[in-house]
Image: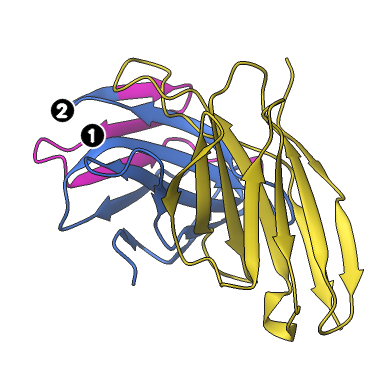
Chain colours: A blue, B yellow
Amino acid sequence: GQQLNQSPQSMFIQEGEDVSMNCTSSSIFNTWLWYKQDPGEGPVLLIALYKAGELTSNGRLTAQFGITRKDSFLNISASIPSDVGIYFCAGHRTDSWGKLQFGAGTQVVVTP
Amino acid sequence: AAGVIQSPRHLIKEKRETATLKCYPIPRHDTVYWYQQGPGQDPQFLISFYEKMQSDKGSIPDRFSAQQFSDYHSELNMSSLELGDSALYFCASSLRAGSSTGANVLTFGAGSRLTVL
């Protein structure tokens, strides 16, 4: 079953607006990764987080590793049309370095 | 920079046939992962290898098997194919080094799309 709860499932926003999505779990994670996937392509890494409380930015993207190590959020500021895609959170649990678990994804649609 | 190479990109098979997917990880990466992604789904973990030994196992059917070879490339073998096996199959690789920065960041290939008719 889904061990990472990602929300929202989808977002329809206007160009220039900010986007926020998050992932929660009942388990503790050692790493949180955020990926973006375009149709028919492989997921592409956006941000990697390694320590509880860590706040990392990559251009207009900002992500944080929750203090409890059970959650993470991703913000996109001033969205542009090329931000369209599916965003996945993913993480390694403390007892499972060989398995990266994914959330269900957030579909982002940006309208001009 | 070299990426994860998967082949073939597209594959069409009939039910009950066999398929083999290949993956060439990023040089010096010591861990290879296989994922299956159905339409509108998130990637589902199948299996991973660390230094050519099976590391973790996910929801991989018994009809599927995988291995990692001495040159670190990996193959996913799927037998007795069913319609439900139609999906995108991703290979990813990473460097496993505990929690040091840059470690355990999976780089994904472009995927192999399997269609079972």
**Which residue shows up at 64% across the image and 73% down it?**
B63
**Which residue shows up at 44% across the image and 60% down it?**
B58
Q: Seen in the image, is B22 located left or right of residue B67?
A: right
Residue B111 position within the rendered picture, expressed as x and y whole percent measured from the top left: 73, 49
Q: Chain of mark 1?
A: A
* Residue neighbourhood size for the residue with mark 1, other residues' Cα within 10 Å, grouped as few (<14), some (14–19), many (≥20): many
- Give the secondary structure at mark 1: strand
* Residue neighbourhood size for the residue with mark 2, other residues' Cα within 10 Å, grouped as few (<14), some (14–19), many (≥20): some
Labels 2 and 1 in the same subunit = yes
Residue marked by disc 1: A65
Q: Foreground: B81 or B100?
A: B81
Residue B43 falls in image quadrant: bottom right
Q: Amino acid at mark 2?
A: Gly
Residue marked by disc 2: A53
Residue A3 position within the rendered picture, expressed as x and y whole percent measured from the top left: 29, 62
Q: Is residue A72 magenta?
A: yes
Disc 2, disc 1: CB below 8 Å?
yes
- Give the secondary structure at mark 2: loop
Magenta range is A56-82
Q: Seen in the image, is B60 located left or right of residue A18?
A: right
Q: Residue A89, can we see it?
A: yes
Q: CA distance from mark 2 to mark 1?
A: 5 Å
Q: Earlier in the sequence, mark 2 or mark 1?
A: 2
Residue B27 position within the rendered picture, expressed as x and y whole percent measured from the top left: 67, 18
**Which residue shows up at 43% across the image and 40% down it?**
A34
Residue A1 falls in image quadrant: bottom left
Q: Is residue B23 magenta?
A: no
Q: Amino acid at mark 1?
A: Phe
